[in-house]
């Protein structure tokens, strides 16, 4: 009953978010948020420069929000539906489990999603167990990156032995055996692995067997500091990889919530494929239904658009005050004016939920 009422509440807010986007009223709090909790990372990934930037100059991580600051910030937000806690590598923060627990206590999200490179097996295993003890009925999704099989993964990630650690972490997640825990896997299709992505997909689905699996095309993003990296795998390679993944995933029956998740994912893949032929503009709800808080408190409309909305420290860690500020309104004006062409998955899902034509497309995928 409780989940049904919450589902109804989200659906009833769809027209309100559309009014917020088009008319500026009512000003609603976000449905979903991303918190990039650290710029620390121990990998030198070919697709992302966060790790290289930190390893070359560890001072770039100085001044990150503290646990006490996160507690105050979370208390000012109100209820969220789903949240991503990322980095960098989040498990490089010793207080990361406490950040996740504070988030769950204050914002009571349905889902907390944590992407990880899988290299800190012990820290992740013990930290996830602690998190589950304090999350209540919030679901925890641990998304482990896998961009190749064996040494190919290690080369893309710039970390010898990373593949073996991913396998160890997968075993550790299964041993936790908690119904609130989802073991997810994520593969990024880039110029560095495109030729071998079908092999990776088959390994993930046949051997690793995670609870969920998603592919993304590599992207240039401000958070990755990778605007000088040649990422493009080419339309043919991305299309072949997504077609192969779709055939494999369609063969796995899904009902209920997993079927709905698959429908949103199919819609996301369809959008990625459509954009292979050129940019496709869509209505974006960044800065309206979602936003990203960066490690030192800067708030962006999203990690792709990066429209600056302010810094929470300038508002005494009161998120609602920042959300109502003139600078936040200016960021929303930018989103209204500039038709968005990005394909960030974190933004794709709320966009699909809140934009009626996209939601109809998701429903079509669900009924297929």
Image: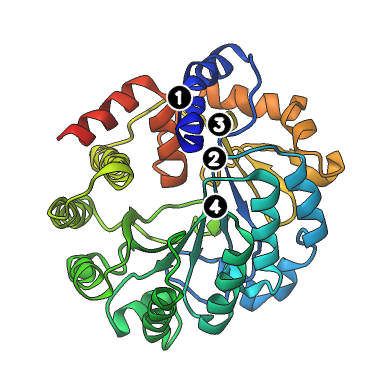
Front tag of 2 and 3: 2
Q: Which residue is mark 3?
A: 289
Mark 2 or 3, nearer chain start: 2
Asked whether 263 or 191 is in front, the reply is 263
- x, y percent for residue 230: 38, 60
Q: Which residue is mark 1?
A: 11
For residue 26, say whether it is visible.
yes
Point 77% across, 40% down: residue: 76
SS assignment at label 4? loop
Q: Which residue is mark 2?
A: 81
- Determine the CA span between mark 1 and mark 2: 12 Å
Front tag of 3 and 4: 4
- Determine the CA span between mark 3 and mark 1: 13 Å
Mark 3 or 4, nearer chain start: 4
SS assignment at label 3? loop
Image quadrant where one finds the C terminus:
top left
Q: Which residue is mark 4?
A: 138
- Determine the CA span between mark 2 and mark 4: 10 Å
Point 37% across, 74% down: residue: 156
Mark 3 or 1, nearer chain start: 1
**Location of residue 169 with respect to 221 vertically, above or below:** below
């Amino acid at each position: 009953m409780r989940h049904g009422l919450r589902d109804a509440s989200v659906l009833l807010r769809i027209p309100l978010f559309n009014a917020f986007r088009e008319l500026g009223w009512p000003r609603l709090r976000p449905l979903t948020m991303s918190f990039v909790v650290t710029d620390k990372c121990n990998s030198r990934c070919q697709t992302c420069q966060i790790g290289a930037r930190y390893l070359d100059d560890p001072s770039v991580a100085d001044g990150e929000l503290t646990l006490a600051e996160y507690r105050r910030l979370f208390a000012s937000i109100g209820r969220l539906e789903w949240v991503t806690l990322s980095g960098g590598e989040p498990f490089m923060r010793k207080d990361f489990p406490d950040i996740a627990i504070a988030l769950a206590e204050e914002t009571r999200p349905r889902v907390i999603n944590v992407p990880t490179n899988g290299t800190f097996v012990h820290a992740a295993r013990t930290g996830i167990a602690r998190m589950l003890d304090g999350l209540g009925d919030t679901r925890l999704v641990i998304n482990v990156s896998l961009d190749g099989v064996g040494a190919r993964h290690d080369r893309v990630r710039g970390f010898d032995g990373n593949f073996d650690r991913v396998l160890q972490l997968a075993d550790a997640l299964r041993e936790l055996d908690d119904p609130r825990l989802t073991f997810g896997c994520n593969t990024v299709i880039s110029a560095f692995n495109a030729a071998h992505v079908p092999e990776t997909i088959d390994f993930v689905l046949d051997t690793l067997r995670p609870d969920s699996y998603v592919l993304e095309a590599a992207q240039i993003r401000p958070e990755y500091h990778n605007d000088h990296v040649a990422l493009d795998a080419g339309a043919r390679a991305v299309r072949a990889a997504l077609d192969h993944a779709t055939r494999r995933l369609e063969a796995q029956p899904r009902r209920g919530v997993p079927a709905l998740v698959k429908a949103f994912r199919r819609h996301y893949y369809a959008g990625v494929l459509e954009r292979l032929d050129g940019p496709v503009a869509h209505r974006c709800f960044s800065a309206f239904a979602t936003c990203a808080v960066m490690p030192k408190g800067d708030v962006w409309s999203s990690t792709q658009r990066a429209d600056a909305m302010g810094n929470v420290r300038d508002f005494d860690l009161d998120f609602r005050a920042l959300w109502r500020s003139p600078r936040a309104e200016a960021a929303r004006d930018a989103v209204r004016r500039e038709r968005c062409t990005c394909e960030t998955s974190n933004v794709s899902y709320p966009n699909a939920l809140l934009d009626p034509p996209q939601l109809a497309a998701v429903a079509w995928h669900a009924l297929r």
